[in-house]
C-alpha cells in the first residue's frame, strides 16, 4: 500500500512525524506538506505564485503552499506512482463542528478524495496535545480497516482522538458534526506605527454538543469518526426553490 501524508501544521510538526513512523510500518509513505503552519487555509489553491517543492533533511517534501496545494501537486505532477490513500494529520488540536470548513487538515483529505483517493483527516483533540502515539495507533487501525472496506465515493473520514493514553480511550463512535455559537469578536489593536490591525477572534463555544455529535464523543473519551460527504447540495430545499423559479419565470414572462 502506498500512502500520501500531508497536514496543515507544517512538515516539521510532531504529529506528522509520528504518523509517518507509525504508518511506515504497514505502507510505503510519501510526505508532501507545507513549509510552515498553514492552519485555517481551508481548500485554497495557490494560483498567483509558483509552487516550489524541496526535499527536507528528514526526507519529507516541503512545499511553499497550502495543504490543498501539497496534495494536488503530489497527485497530479510530483509523484511517479499514484498513492492508494491520503492521510492528513495528526493535527495539533481538534477539528470538530464548523472547524471542518476552515481546517487545512480536512482540506488536504478533501483534495485527496476529489482526486479519487480514499482519505482520512485525523486530529488530536486537546488544548495541550501530548498523546500523539494514541492518535497514531488509531490512525493505523483505521487505515488498515479502510484498505479492506472502502468508503463510498465523495466520502472522507474526519477523525478526532481525545488527548489521552490509548488505554484510557472508551472506544469509537460514529458521529455527526456539532455546531458552535457565533465566533468571538475580532480583536482590534494597532501596530507599532499606530495603524489599525485586526486579529480573528476565537471560535464560538459549543452549541449543539449533545449525544451523537463529535463534541460529545470526544468530551466523553471516545474517538469521533464523522463521515463527511463532499456533495454540498442541499436536496431538501429543491421543492422550495422550484417554487421560487416558477414565481420568477411568471413574473418575468419566461
Image (tube, rainbow, N blue to C red):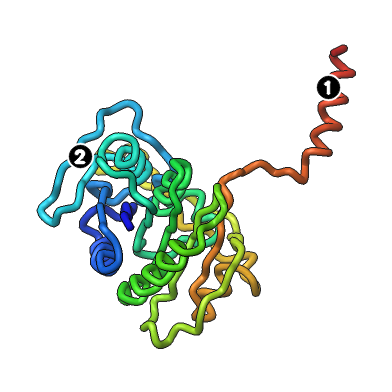
Task: Report the label total.
Answer: 2
Query: Which residue does the numbered mark 1 point to in the structure image?
Result: 248
- Is disc 2 placed on a helix, strand or loop? strand
Q: Position of residue 149 (x, y in %)?
A: 51, 63
Q: Position of residue 152 (x, y in %)?
A: 57, 53
Q: Quadrant of residue 72?
A: top left
The residue furthest top is: 253
- Seen at 24% across and 43% down, the residue is 192
Query: Which residue does the numbered mark 2 point to in the structure image?
Result: 53
Q: Along the line of sight, which residue is nearer the eye, 188 or 143?
A: 143
First reached walking from the N terminus: tag 1 or tag 2: 2
Vertical arrangement, residue 67 with respect to residue 161, above or below: above
- Seen at 21% across and 57% down, the residue is 12
Q: Along the line of sight, which residue is nearer the eye, 63 or 210?
A: 63
Q: Quadrant of residue 216?
A: bottom right
The residue furthest bottom is: 167
> Can residue 251 be seen by looking at this rendering?
yes
> Can residue 190 be seen by looking at this rendering?
no
Q: Along the line of sight, which residue is nearer the eye, 97 or 122?
A: 122
- Of marks 1 and 2, the one in the foreground: 2
- Is disc 1 placed on a helix, strand or loop? helix
Per the model, the C-alpha gap separating discs 1 and 2 is 51 Å
Q: Position of residue 135 (x, y in %)?
A: 37, 72
For the C terminus, the quadrant is top right
Q: Position of residue 204 (x, y in %)?
A: 54, 59
- Seen at 46% across and 57% down, the residue is 202
Amino acid at each position: 500500500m502506498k500512502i500520501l501524508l500531508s497536514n496543515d501544521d507544517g512538515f516539521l510538526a510532531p504529529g506528522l512525524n509520528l504518523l509517518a513512523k507509525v504508518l511506515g510500518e504497514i505502507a510505503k509513505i510519501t510526505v508532501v506538506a507545507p513549509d510552515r503552519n498553514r492552519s485555517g487555509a481551508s481548500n485554497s489553491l495557490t494560483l498567483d505564485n509558483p509552487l516550489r517543492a524541496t526535499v527536507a533533511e528528514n526526507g519529507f517534501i516541503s512545499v511553499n503552499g497550502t495543504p490543498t496545494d501539497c496534495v494536488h501537486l503530489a497527485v497530479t505532477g510530483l509523484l511517479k506512482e499514484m498513492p492508494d490513500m491520503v492521510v492528513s494529520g495528526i493535527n495539533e488540536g481538534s477539528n470538530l463542528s464548523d472547524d471542518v470548513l476552515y481546517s487545512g487538515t480536512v482540506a488536504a483529505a478533501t483534495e485527496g478524495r476529489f482526486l479519487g483517493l480514499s482519505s482520512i483527516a485525523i486530529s488530536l483533540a486537546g488544548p495541550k496535545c501530548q498523546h500523539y502515539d494514541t492518535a497514531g495507533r488509531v490512525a493505523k487501525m483505521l487505515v488498515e480497516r479502510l484498505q479492506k472496506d472502502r468508503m463510498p465515493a465523495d466520502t472522507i473520514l474526519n477523525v478526532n482522538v481525545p488527548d489521552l493514553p490509548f488505554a484510557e480511550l472508551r472506544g469509537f463512535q460514529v458521529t455527526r458534526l456539532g455546531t458552535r455559537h457565533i465566533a468571538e469578536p475580532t480583536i482590534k489593536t494597532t501596530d507599532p506605527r499606530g495603524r489599525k490591525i485586526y486579529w480573528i477572534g476565537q471560535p464560538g463555544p459549543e452549541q449543539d454538543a449533545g449525544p451523537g455529535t463529535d463534541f460529545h464523543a470526544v468530551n466523553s473519551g471516545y474517538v469521533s469518526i464523522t463521515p463527511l460527504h463532499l456533495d454540498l447540495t442541499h436536496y431538501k430545499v429543491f421543492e422550495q426553490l422550484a417554487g421560487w423559479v416558477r414565481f420568477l419565470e411568471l413574473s418575468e414572462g419566461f
